[in-house]
Image: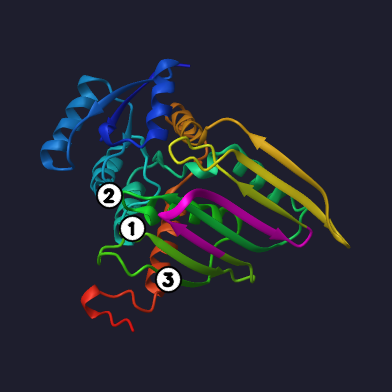
Amino acid sequence: MSQIRMAVIGADELDPEHHIALNRLTETGRIAAYALDAAPTAEGFAQLENAIVRDRIEALVIAGARTELAPWLTFALPRGWPIYSTHPVPSTVEEMIDIRRAEQSVTRPVLEFGMTFRHHESVVTALNKAGSGEYGALLSVRAICGVAGSTGDILFEFGAQMLDLLHAFAGPFQDIGGFADLDRTETPGSETNVLATLRTHAGTLASLHVSATQWRPTFRLELGFERGYLWLEGLNVDQNYFGQETLIYARTGGEGAQHEMVERFDQSNGALSALQHFLDRVANPAVAAATNSQQAFDTLNTLHRILAADPIYAPIQERHVS
């Protein structure tokens, strides 16, 4: 398999998982990575175009600030360059609409978003079991993702990842309620705790808690079906110490659970698997996308609907809390 030459924009701000994955792909000779330190300005765009020609760049990885994602994408997509975003979503629905317009301006775009949770082995296994039909209809989902402290954007990063999983297993959602903590700025992304309740048109109920004050880092996804359950606990993401990735599942009989099974997974392969799939699409654009802009749009739209459902989600100076 030939080596693919990639420009990594914002390389010094890569999250640890993507950083490790890119290093592994470089070491195996799958890619040659070139860091590009540039802002999404006319000068930065010129730097990128020069790098494309000078270094024969074939694909882009966009890291850095989430607020810079949309300008980079709307510049690069119409030029037909394959792009991987380490962020699962941009900042606003309006930005997502602009991104999708830019994507639709080319015949066969290659765009993937960093929804790495769905690439983990336990999640893939659970999705296959849920899709097999042997457990019957999905009735309820409870999702929790929390870390000890956060540099910000807990909702737009972990929250978006969890919402992507909720959509993959149960969505889309018709009815949405939500509450966010009061100690935040006016700009979405400063929340430290968000609680949401969701319901599909078919009546599947879901709840979500995303937290930066979960002092024991937690990843949990509990799925209750007509004829059994699937529980995901832990996620092999080294920097967050969620615990070992585990899938617990059982069919139910007339008197409760029957033959509970436990599978444990050792590899931390979320970002690596996502990037490998992206590289497969760079080599062959006919390969189906693992994550697409419609999924990112649905996730971001649900995220903003959760915030909008908070009855006091208004500018801080207008809030009246008793």
Q: Nearer the viewer, residue 295 or 286?
A: 295
Query: Which residue bears the numbered disc 2?
Result: 70
Which quadrant would residue 317 be assigned to in this image?
bottom left
- Which of the two labelled residues, at mark 2 and mark 1, occupies the earlier sequence position? 2
Q: Is residue 180 left or right of residue 124?
A: left
| In this view, 295 is above or below 277 | below
Q: Give how far apart the Cα atoms at labels 3 and 1 are.
A: 26 Å
Residue 194: x percent and y percent? 43, 64
Bounds of the magenta span? 207-227
Residue shown at 44% from the left, 49% from the top: 147
* Viewer-side label of 2, 1: 2
Q: Nearer the viewer, residue 311 or 33?
A: 311
Residue 240: x percent and y percent? 45, 41
- Indicate yes or no whether the magenta region holds residue 222: yes
Q: SS for tag 3?
A: strand
Q: SS for tag 2?
A: helix
- Count neighbours of disc 2 (C-alpha within 10 A) and say few if under 14, some if 14 to 19, many if 20 or more: many
Question: Residue 179, labelled with which disc?
Answer: 3
